[in-house]
Image: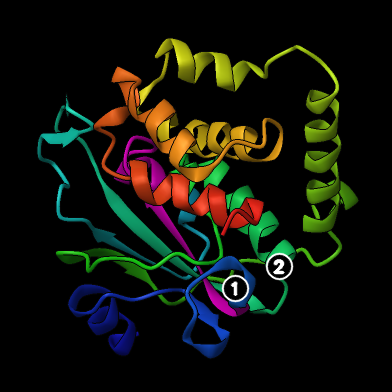
Amino acid sequence: MQHLFFCITERVWSNCIWAGCYREDQAFVASHYCALDIDDGATKLEALEILKDYNYILGATKSDGLEKVENGKVKPPMDRFRVVIPWSEPIYSLDVYKYNIKLMAKKLQADKKALDGARCWQPCKQIDYFNHQGKNLQVIVDIPEEEREDAKTKKFADIQEYYKNTTRVPQYVEEVLSGQLEAGDINDKLLLTAYYLFQVKEKSFDYVMDFLGGIEAIKNHSHFETTVISAAKKSGVF
């Protein structure tokens, strides 16, 4: 485990491997470890109870036990840490990876936004706990059909087609336009709303940037421009 301790505390690292050095979902080729970020979920003691039968490494992140400012809001001191658990076998499918990591994330109340196949991590400031005499995390290979990416893509396309033929507006769009957003929801709902404007309303990139940039709740969001660009790329705008 010493090489993992060094990697986790001294390097920017990932639990995923990508083809062609492209850090994105589409380039995912393998994962040997489950890695989760717990920022506002289980405490360390709760996590240790959940992980007691597993091989694991638990490392404190830089804001562990400190106040943290996120999207202009101050979050109180709390346990903030990262957990790394070896899979029982290498995972070569993005669908299988996302399904399995989501199961453990639910148990630890981990950050749901950090379950993609393109995640990389900043170094932990220290390793707090570890166990190398437990079991590895069992991989479920036969995942439900609705959890497969092609099924999700088709469902999303069907929804977009529906909204092209109705005057109704998706709830997430209404929430963005009205500014009724929680700090942790901004990025996801901004992405979906930008995608809606590109795909359903067939708006230009400049229009979407100007339109969404005029909304007080999101115009100062740190990832505003990159999120809209991401939606534009997914929509084929450029």
Q: Earlier in the sequence, mark 2 or mark 1?
A: 1
Label 1 neighbour load within 10 Å: few <14, some 14-19, many 20+: many
Please say whether residue 29 is one of the residues in the magenta stretch.
yes
Nearer-the-camera pick, 89 or 22: 22
Name the quadrant containing residue 204: top right
Point out which mark residue 189 bears.
none
The boundaries of the magenta stretch are 28-49
Q: Is residue 33 magenta?
A: yes
SS label for mark 2? loop
Q: Is residue 10 above or below residue 35?
A: below
At numbered mark 1, what does the secondary structure look like: helix, strand or loop? strand
Check disc 1 and report the residue beneath it: 87
Residue 153 locus on image (x, y percent): 79, 50
The amino acid type, in three-letter code, at marker 2 is Val
In the image: residue 128, left or right of residue 92? left
Q: Quadrant of residue 163?
A: top right
